[in-house]
Image (spheres, grey):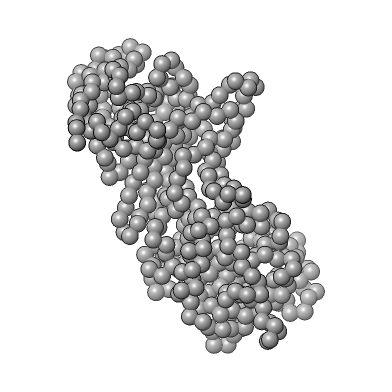
């Protein structure tokens, strides 16, 4: 390991920087005025002199300097450090860090509003992440470009060992989409995006910035297939008839009041219940039904932890092999030594939800899977699953039409609680239903 020293001059202030010459080949330097949070980024080459002009700021100005050391052709931060300048001479060592550096602030008060769009190419099955600006005005001239600096920090836990990674990249685009750096699945991501303006030479001035935000990179099709295999391995065949798919909510719930008024039980966005990296969380609309009855009586339980209003629908009304697709989505538990759950998604072919699920979730054969299938010998639907099976039905329920069908029921049952807003995340310490790498919040 060969250590070298470089001098970074910022006005009349000097920083003596020590780093391993073999590890990095370029430097990105964020300089922030701690009084007004004005922020500038500088791109430096390890072979050149390092001089930063801060527009002749007063000598008593306090600056926060964050230095990122990277390889020449990659955005991953190898070495970094942060220092506060409050005297003429400073020493700094760039080093590998157990936790990423803090995000630089920004003077920009007009927030950059972003959505995170996790896409899958249906032809190649390759995943990509796009930051989409909500309020960007598209350039009127073809040659005009927007410049962004994205700082991405990720955390993953593999076999109970936490690892942190940090990335910095300058991105140029002529539309409202900012391609994110390529990230693995199941990573907890903390990010901040800066819109910058070239200010001559190696300098970029921040004009707008997003809030610091988080997301988790979705499971890939491979990940979901691996969850499916875990569910099969954990399964102890318990065959039961499925006479009803049943759904419980509190009678006073706004969605139930609206359904009573209109006759339509309207689907709504799926919450964050289950695997934290599930691609359907907060992405598709549906209504949850349980397919698992009381294991002794084979009928739905007399009480519910989700509310006192229950509808019971014979599965054949929703499960039609000609007009429905069924996908495996999740295998999870909520607490140690608690029951396990299987999540299936039931879609209408060609619907928005079906198009979304097709490249992301493994499709099952309605007539040949262990979780929910039609048994022609007995003339009804059955399950061979020792886990509780839940079905996300991705269409509205017409209660008026359902009431005209023999077998549909609406009941009042004893309520022992109601669902938690936002859902209950997966128990990431379970050795049965977790993939080797589990996302956790930064």
In the displayed structure, 109 sits above or below 258; it is above
Q: Position of residue 200 (x, y in %)?
A: 43, 15
Q: Is residue 179 above or below residue 329?
A: above
**Residue 382 at what x, y percent from top left?**
62, 80
Q: Is residue 298 visible?
A: yes
On the image, the x and y values in percent for residue 190 come to 42, 43
Left or right relative to 352: residue 68: left
Left or right, 57 with reference to 294: left
Relative to the observer, which residue lies in front, 134 or 45?
45
Residue 428 sits in which quadrant?
bottom left
Q: Which quarter shows the N terminus?
A: top left
Q: Quadrant of residue 436?
A: bottom left
The quarter of the displayed image where residue 258 is located? bottom right
Q: Residue at x 49, y 30 (%)?
A: 171
Residue 386, horizontal then vertical, whole percent: 50, 78
Residue name at image x 37 percent, y 38 percent: 76
Which residue is depicted at the point 62% across and 83% down?
241
């Amino acid at each position: 390991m060969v250590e070298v020293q470089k001098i970074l001059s910022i006005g009349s202030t000097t920083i003596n920087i020590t780093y391993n010459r073999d590890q990095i080949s370029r430097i990105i330097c964020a300089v922030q005025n701690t009084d007004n949070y004005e922020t500038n980024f500088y791109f430096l080459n390890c072979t050149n002199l390092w001089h930063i002009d801060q527009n002749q700021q007063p000598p008593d100005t306090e600056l926060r300097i964050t230095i990122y050391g990277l390889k020449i052709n990659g955005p991953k931060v190898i070495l970094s450090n942060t220092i506060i300048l409050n005297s003429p001479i400073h020493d700094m060592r760039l080093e590998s860090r157990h936790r990423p550096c803090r995000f630089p602030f920004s003077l920009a008060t007009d927030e950059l509003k972003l959505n995170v769009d996790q896409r899958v190419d249906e032809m190649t099955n390759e995943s990509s992440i796009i930051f989409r600006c909500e309020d960007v005005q598209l350039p009127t001239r073809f040659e005009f470009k927007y410049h962004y600096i994205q700082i991405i920090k990720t955390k993953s836990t593999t076999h109970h060992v936490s690892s942190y990674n940090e990335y910095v990249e300058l991105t140029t685009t002529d539309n409202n989409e900012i391609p994110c750096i390529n990230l693995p699945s199941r990573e907890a991501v903390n990010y901040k995006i800066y819109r910058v303006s070239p200010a001559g030479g190696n300098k970029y001035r921040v004009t707008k910035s997003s809030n610091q935000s988080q997301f988790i990179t979705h499971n890939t099709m491979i990940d979901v297939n691996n969850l499916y295999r875990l569910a099969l391995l954990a399964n102890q065949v318990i065959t039961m008839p499925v006479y009803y798919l049943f759904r419980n909510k509190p009678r006073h719930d706004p969605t139930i009041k609206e359904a009573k008024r209109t006759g339509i039980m309207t689907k709504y966005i799926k919450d964050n219940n289950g695997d934290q990296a599930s691609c359907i969380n907060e992405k598709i609309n549906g209504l949850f039904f349980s397919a698992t009855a009381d294991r002794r009586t084979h009928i739905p339980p007399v009480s519910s932890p989700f509310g006192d209003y229950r509808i019971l629908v014979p599965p054949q009304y929703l499960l039609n092999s000609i007009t429905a697709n069924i996908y495996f989505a999740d295998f999870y538990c909520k607490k140690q030594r608690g029951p396990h759950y299987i999540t299936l998604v039931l879609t209408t072919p060609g619907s928005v939800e079906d198009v979304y699920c097709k490249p992301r979730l493994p499709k099952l054969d309605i007539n040949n899977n262990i979780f929910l299938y039609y048994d022609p010998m007995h003339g009804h639907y059955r399950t061979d699953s020792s886990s509780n099976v839940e079905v996300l039905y991705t269409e509205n329920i017409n209660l008026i039409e359902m009431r005209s069908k023999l077998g549909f029921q609406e009941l009042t049952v004893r309520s022992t609680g109601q669902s938690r807003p936002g859902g209950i995340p997966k128990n990431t310490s379970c050795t049965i239903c977790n993939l080797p790498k589990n996302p956790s919040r930064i």
